[in-house]
Amino acid sequence: MTPLESPSRRELNKAATRESIVEATVQLARERGLGEFTVEDIADAAGVSRRTFFNYFSSADEALAAPTFGFLDAALERFRDRPRGEPLLESAIQILLALADNKLIEPMAQSFLVSHGHDPVTRFQLQAFDECSDKIVAAIREREGDTLDAIYVHSLAGCVMSCGKAALEVWLAERGGDLSPSSLSRLRELLVTSFEHLKSGFKTS
């Protein structure tokens, strides 16, 4: 879909169904703990059938990791709107600042909290990061053409994703299960700071 096109009613309904499934999964994980609920429980909580659930996700673990994909995809969409020639890390920082009031931060943080240390979900989250790294490379090529060396683009994409994961780990160690507005602001601050460190070449002074 191009920027000039509006989503159809069917697309909006599908997006709403997907969101309700994800929200139900995260809520059940927070209330009961991982492994303590079934796909049927998720479907009931989301108000959909079991079959509908599997139209969107292969498992509860995949649904639980979905907010990570959603956050990364939204950030990439904003990256494509940044001006050509702008330093790439500056684009990343400005995107995070623009997400200050975006509700994508909290679902991603919730997903990370409830799934931390749970290998099946972590596998899907790592898949999200890997896929996003590839998408970053494609987005940079789309915006900048062939003006940058391949090794620069791929290295930068990998570093950006590593910085994002590092920020989440530090945030979890600092704030535990806190999802208050101030805690989410701290997560955003850590994400921005990690990119600023990368931008400066990790200078210590």
Image (spheres, rainbow, N blue to C red):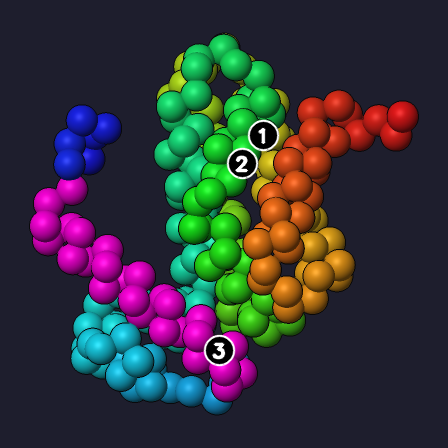
- Amino acid type at mark 2: Leu
State the extent of the magenta-drawn residues as a range: 7-33
Badge 2, how many Cα within 10 Å: few under 14, some, many 20+? some
Circles 1 and 2 in contact, beta carbons < 8 Å: yes
Magenta stretch contains residue 23: yes
Question: What's the CA distance linking mark 1 and mark 2?
Answer: 5 Å
The secondary structure type at the circle numbered 3 is: helix
Quadrant for residue 183, please give it: bottom right
Disc 3 or 2, which lies upstream in sequence? 3
- Separation of disc 3 and disc 1 at Cα? 31 Å
- Residue 106 in sight here: yes
Marker disc for residue 106: none
Give the image location of residue 150, x and y in percent: 54, 22
Q: Position of residue 162 (x, y in %)?
A: 65, 44
- Alpha carbon separation for disc pair 3 and 2: 27 Å
Outermost residue, bottom direction? 36
- Residue tagged by mark 1? 93
Q: Is residue 33 above or below residue 59?
A: below
119 vs 94, nearest the viewer: 94
Residue 80 quadrant: top left
> Is the N terminus in the top left, top right, bottom left or bottom right quadrant?
top left
Does the magenta run of residues contain 105? Answer: no
Q: Position of residue 181 (x, y in %)?
A: 57, 54
Residue under the point 51% across and 64% down? 111
Cβ atoms at labels 3 and 2 below 8 Å apart: no
Q: Which mark is residue 96?
A: 2
**Residue tagged 3:** 29
Residue 163 is at least partly visible in this image: no
